[in-house]
Amino acid sequence: MTGLLNYQLINYVRSYRYIPPFSVYIMALIVNYTYIPNPTLDSYSFTSLVLFFIMGWFTITIFHAEDEGQKQITLLHCKSLREYYLALFIICALIGFCLSCIYVAYPIVIGAFGVETRLLHIIMGLLSHFSLSIVAIALSAIFTRELVKNKGNTWWGVLSILIISVAIASFKSTILQVKGLIWLLPPVHLSLEMLSSKDSIKFIPGLFYWQFGWIFLYGFLFIGLFFLLIKHRRTN
Amino acid sequence: MKIIMELQDITKQYREKIVLENTSFSIYANQVVALVGKNGSGKSTLLKIIGGLVKPDSGVVHKYIQPLKIGYVPEVTPSHILFTPEEYLTHMGNIRGMAKGQIQQRIDNLIETFNLQDARKTRIEHFSKGMKQKVAIMQAMLEETDLLILDEPLSGLDPISQSDLEGILLILKERGLSVVLTCHETKLLENIVDRVLLIKDHQVIQTSSLQGSVNKGNRFIFAIATETSLEELLPFIEIQQERHLNSGVNEIEATVNQEDTDKILLELLKRGASIKQLIPIHRVEEGFYNHF
């Protein structure tokens, strides 16, 4: 697995496909904190949403970085379809984690917040950024070339699912009328609701941990679905 | 001759479409086998079954060497590899789980065999298609290989690259490797293939050897003035095709027996003809190429 991770990471770096999403990531960071002071949790809410979309972009470029013909050869050498895609998911998650840390740390370092930053702000910031990254990775992977042959459909598919995920927050009351439906839809709205808490919040409610836990679990379930679909496609 | 693999009653279908049906044949040690047949006849599927990449719906694959080490070169040659051959092969070796020392020794060996010393530090994306194909074969031979499987190895290569690769395949054959390949290139079949397996109607129905074929005559193409009479030569040649070129010249494709070839060519030259091409005819090949 280490050999595969090393190869995929170097291949991705050499492909320069990370430059467009990374540029947008940096621009969003700098523009957002041009004026100070800023509210803490509100800012984190905004940047976690930006990261949600950017991680969709990163995921597609990571999954498509390897030459199509070479992918067949790499699969032959690693002898396991599961291991091959697991390596790609790990790289996506690593990048998601690093970018989450930067989005949380940068405003603290430059003193962009109006109130004193406490540990609970950092924890909530990290959890919201990283959990949304995982969901974005999981949802976007479903539209990569292994499952969607047409490149155009890949980009439209990813963009649509990510926009719908965010739009659910606005239509939540309507969605709740259909029993159980809310559990099937991407739980991005939970993160937005939690981060709409006041900066003066004294402690993180226990419910918040459950809700972050559900966002992570939802992402992992979708990654599981990806592996099931891949297996189904390969055997048919 | 030692059998290294035997396929018995192999059947494979994709979405109700039968690709192979009760196909049986053997692969021998130190032999180059060509799988031929029309597009969609199941050549690549059979290669993948031999390589263990696809499971047959029914039938058995017996391996008589344990473990039988198989290298596989897919039909699509990767074009954008962002590594040098050395880096690339090291990564593939690491992914395979090979030991570092073993990888380096093998890379040195392969680079020498495939004559890529000068390109050792150049990124593969800058290589010609022929060189990329060489790297594709090298990755399949990273570990000591008993059987090398090549899907259309010469496809899309220019004549020089084809000759170069053909030389490499000959070297591998001399080193005792068994090779199974699919191909359309007649030259490769003539020069290195020991046995030809034809896939027709979902089965391997014909086994023949091209190297044992006998030269029965020659096919030749010549250009000659339209008004020149060929009547005296007609008993000795068989005209296959005749085309009128622009400037009162006909281009004729004909066949002639081996023993009459020199005499006929001389007569044609005396009549002012220009010989464009002369190709030996192998009877086995003649019937065989009709299957492409």
Image: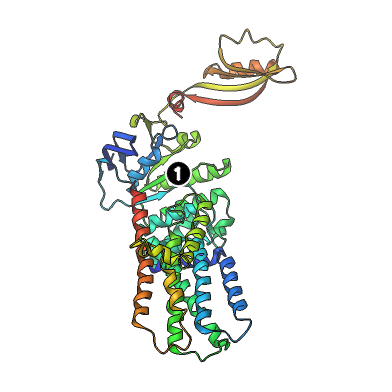
From this view, report whether residue B27 is shown above or below residue B219.
below
- The residue sitting at 50% across, 49% down in the picture is A150
- The residue sitting at 29% across, 37% down in the picture is B11
From this view, report whether residue B141 is shown above or below residue A218.
above
Please identify the quadrant where the N terminus of chain B is shown.
top left
Quarter of the image for residue B228 reads top right
- The residue sitting at 52% across, 52% down in the picture is A151
Q: Could you classify mark 1 by the number of other residues whose Cα lies within 10 Å: few (under 14), some (14-19), or many (20 or more)? A: some
- In the image, residue A24 lies at what x, y percent? 59, 70
In this view of the protein, which residue sits in the foreground, A108 or B203?
Answer: A108
In this view of the protein, which residue sits in the foreground, B269 or B83?
Answer: B83
Q: Label 1 sits on what residue type?
A: Leu
Position of A28 with respect to B85 (left or right) is right
Q: Residue furthest right?
A: B247
Helix or strand or loop: what does disc 1 sit on? helix
Q: Is residue B95 visible?
A: no
From this view, report whether residue B79 is shown above or below residue B60.
below
- In the image, residue A170 lies at what x, y percent? 48, 67
> What's the colour scheme?
rainbow
Q: Is residue B257 visible?
A: yes
Which chain is indicated by disc 1?
B
Q: Which residue is mark 1?
A: B170
Position of A234 with respect to B257 (left or right) is left
From this view, report whether residue A93 is shown above or below residue B119.
below
